[in-house]
Image: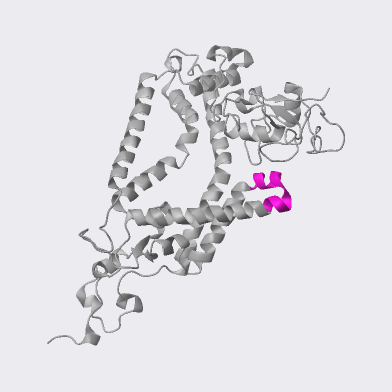
Amino acid sequence: MALSLSEKKPPPLTSSPYPYAAAPDIIRAHQKDAYFQGYLTNQLNDLHRRLRGARSAHAWAIETRTLADLLYLSLTTLIGNRTLGEEYCDLVQVEEPSLLSRLRTPQDDASPSPSPSASAAGPLLPSLPRRAGYIATSILLPYLLNRLLPSVRGSIRRHLQDRLTVLTRQGQGSTSSTPSRAYRLQRYLLAHLSNLTSGAHLHAAMLATFYFTGAYYTLSKRLLGLRYVFTRRVDLDGAGGAGGGRVGYEVLGVLLVVQMVVRSYLHVRDQLLHPHPQTNPDDADDDIDALIRERAFGPGHAAGAGVHVSLDGNAYSSNNELLPAPAGGNGNQRSLAEIGAATHTPVPRGGRPRYDLGAAGDVMAWIKGGQQRKCTLCLEELRDPAATQCGHVFCWTCIGDWVREKPECPLCRRDALVQHILPLRAV
């Protein structure tokens, strides 16, 4: 006997009128959201600059961007609404059905008291805890990791340096004709610490997986089981209609995998061709060997590594020692007093600059024009002016913070090392 209309079972997930979204639509929605998040970030940054000045806005740029992203998702995803990008692409974020729900039998569906979730057709909207977890793992957790990662790297770096110093004193380091395996391994970890602790490799693997499967654009969505479905009927077979077929980005996934394989092959080949410090032309390795010899036997034993200075901001030479350590940074960098004694430059007292071109009087009056007396990084009057090798002038603190992250001039992109920054003094 045929079942009545009220006794019919709900259609399974595969027969839902709202199929899963394709990769192009998901990427388009994320790009749209990124545009609005960037716009909100600029508005908050402009407000911060008006209230506290350009220097404070520059120092808190990361926090401003994090606050803007958090505010955007809190006003959309957290309260149960769609983001502007999801509305633009007709997408809805849903929970991925669990394995138990996909293995339900018809007898389970015919139970006398089905739950509301079991009687619902198609995927379910994410619950409030899951939406809050998505915001926390996609915004707050990366921000905390970025803040904690420098100190963690500093601790690991100091531990590796201490171990390499002990091995060098025992005759197992670069001074030996055949360095020990422990020395080579720990020197490799020290030279590539930044790359090994970076999330770029995981991000590339997640992106390649997304290109192949068309699901979970970010790691946080994969961890929480959040996917997208269309809110309109689409053509699943690609034979025309409103959907235009379920196209994907599998070709991009293949190219990304090929890129990762080639990079891995080149890296392994370089390590196999140059297993010893004496035959390895890598500047970072030479800097590490020089530093370890200096720590083990004194300053006079570091001359054999060459006179070059690596442009790598993470190299372990004196490249970064002439700058004060940032907040939460490692303790290997010199203090302000030591910097002033080594470079014969003025040391600010109480955090106040000695030469403030915005102050009253004719401080460095030979710098003519209002625009020439302003720093292009903080957009304020120059404080303790300093010039790069290419001749551009910035605040001592601004250009120091810049070259610590990227050793090049902010204006002309020429190489700008820390020890080549020239402080300008009034005579």
| Residue under the image location 72 percent in, 31 percent down | 335
Depth check: give the residue in front, 63 or 315. Answer: 63
Q: Main secondary structure of the magenta part?
A: helix
Residue 326 in magenta?
no
Residue 52 in magenta?
yes
- State which quadrant residue 67 falls in: bottom right
| Residue under the image location 55 percent in, 45 percent down | 146
Q: Is residue 3 visible?
A: yes
- Left or right? Give the position of 284 relative to 385: left
Depth check: give the residue in front, 225 or 243. Answer: 243
The x and y percentages for residue 238 are 22, 58
Depth check: give the residue in front, 260 or 167. Answer: 260
Quadrant containing the N terminus is bottom left
Quadrant containing the C terminus is top right
The x and y percentages for residue 43 are 61, 55
- Left or right? Give the position of 67 relative to 231: right
The x and y percentages for residue 237 are 20, 60
The residue lying furthest to the front in this view is: 369
| Residue under the image location 32 percent in, 34 percent down | 261
Q: Which residues are magenta?
A: 48-60
Depth check: give the residue in front, 301 or 10. Answer: 10
- Left or right? Give the position of 419 relative to 106: right
Say how the picture is coloured.
one colour
The x and y percentages for residue 138 are 48, 54
Q: Is residue 166 visible?
A: no
